[in-house]
Amino acid sequence: MRWGIWNFDMQDEIFNCDVLVIGSGAAGMATALTASVLGLDVIVTEHAPYLGGASAISGGEIWIPLNRQAGDSHDDSEEKAIQYLRDVIGPNFDQSRGVAYVRNAAAALAFLEDNSHLEYELLETVVDYFTDVKGSTHGLRSLGAVPFDGRKLGKHFKTIRSPLPASMIFGGMSLGRLDIPHFSRFTRSLPSLIHVCKMLANHLRDRLLGYHRGTRMVMGNALVGRLALTLMERQVALWTNTATTDLVRNDGRVTGALVAHPTGRRLIRARRAVVLATGSFSGSRQKQMEFLPHVRAGQQHRSHLPTTNDGSGLDLVRTMGGKIDTGLRQPAAFTPVSVVPRPDGSEWLTPHFGDRAKPGVIVVNASGERIANEAINYHDFIAEMLRDSSGRTSAEFYLVTSHKHLRAYGLGRVPAAPGRITPFFRNGYLQKGETLAELADKLNINARGLIETVEAHNAQAHFGSDPVFKKGGTAFERAAGDPSNKPNPCVAPLGTGPFYAIRIIPGDIGTFAGVSVDETGRVLTEDGTVIQGLFAVGTVTSSIMGGTYPAAGAMLGPALTFGYLTAKSIAGQMDDVTATQLDGLEPSETETCKNAAE
């Protein structure tokens, strides 16, 4: 079968299809794939030069209750999953969308896996983030993308967005979740040494063959690579470098879009639907100012997302009279980040997911005081940072540890032993003090406050106790600690100097505020009516998590699920599709996107 990212005869000014999908992240690709399998002709446009959007640089995890990978476990049920979401999300729980998600997530994943190269495996050590909430589970709902050989993409491997530079080593070798433990113990474990040597040998092969990075795709990159290969094989039209300038509406119905292709403006007519899958808005400073209160207040914020995640989908919806839902607990999926200076003047952002939970690590403010339980999930930890910094122009905080714990666990970008830490002194990323007072002076924070904080922490930490913040108090927190550290995997005295610190600020890995939609992805207006012909999926929509982060994969799980549900709705293959939804829609005719073929 002939396949590839199509080369178009762009002398044509009008292109026709059943479904136009705007955006090529996981949600857009899932929608396009499902629609294609169901017999619809699809065009996918992407305004960036690369496919994959923010999904390609993500961790790739998905949260899927009752997935088939978990088998016939009796420890999960629809009722438990719905109860868990309802209790975690609280008043922002959307009953119709939440129930639709839980009831269809497993079927969506099974459909996508059965009809594509997509492959996921159960993360048996990953627990829901609120293990003290009724309905939570351990190791049953979060799944990770199986690594993928990018060489299968042929020349189109280079069209997939590369992972963030900070997530690769040795000039472009990607590390997955399961690779990191091997690298941390390869000097002490023969199986880990073999694993690392195989990875290094394959990476050397790729570079010698001229690949711009390693072809072993992991996490979100594997997710995107697998879906992209399937779309290419199905000859779904993929247009990169193509921005949507306007949506077209006829008789009150969205019927297509005007796009700016490098060769000029073109009209794409969509007989059945236009689907917005344009992603988050946090790559836009303007949108950050609009939606993030702490940014408006002048506080620091850095996003992991590329600038092409600019919120353009929100602007398109506004022109159609659609509603943007901002009434969530938090407007974005937050995580603490540190900024790593590079020799060439550029910077890397490093997220702080699990390092805060390790024993012998505390987080302090400019007064030298601890602000929260360091082991809580990254999203909620930012809420504590913003609470503590409220009313101030700075939201800077500091991860503080000692030499013993730094070399045992690493911190941020700084590796554990035997990795080198000297380069991080040189670029200013890591600060060192032989005493706490010296460290405080280098950080320009209150020395007495830091000394008293560490002394108070150490006094209880000798017993594995943290009476003030209860660090290590839940199964989720303990899972991120060190099981060999008794009696509490997350708590230990800092011990003696030298001491070290890294500056952290608020950041994000995506956004929650977005377009208001129903359970089949139809875009809604302020009064709750449907904009005919216009759908939205993924992080351009208001998150079903209500501004909370219940588990690993809480963004990509809904992206795949609602991409699937939306495509089924457009194809008229859902039991609850109404006459109103299909009113005026033409069946898929013999007229297709053939004018878009090679």
Image (cartoon, rainbow, N blue to C red):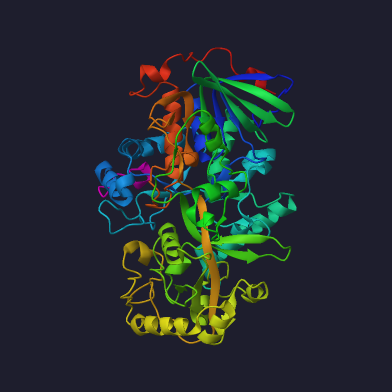
Identify the main secondary structure in magenta: loop
Tell me if residue 463 can be seen: yes
Q: What x and y, as percent, mark residue 409?
A: 50, 72
Magenta range:
66-76
Q: Position of residue 580 (x, y in %)?
A: 38, 18
Q: Is residue 70 magenta?
A: yes
Give above or below for 151 relative to 173.
Answer: above
Which quadrant: the C terminus? top right
Q: Within the image, what quadrant is residue 51 found in?
A: top right
Kindly identify the residue that appears in the image at 51 percent across and 33 percent down: 318
Residue at horizontal 51%, vertical 32%?
A: 317
Residue visible at 52% across and 40% down in the picture:
26
85 over 253 or under it: above or below = below
Examine the rendered structure and indicate whether residue 439 appears above or below residue 144.
below
Give percent across and percent down for residue 470: 32, 71
Seen from the viewer's position, the closer of residues 479 and 90 is 90
Task: Please count the marks in the image.
Answer: 0
Q: Residue 390 in the image: state x and y as whole percent.
A: 45, 63
Position of the N terminus by quadrant: top right
Q: Is residue 154 left or right of residue 565?
A: right
Residue 527 in the magenta stretch? The answer is no
Q: Is residue 59 visible?
A: no
Q: Where on the picture, by quarter, is residue 11?
A: top right
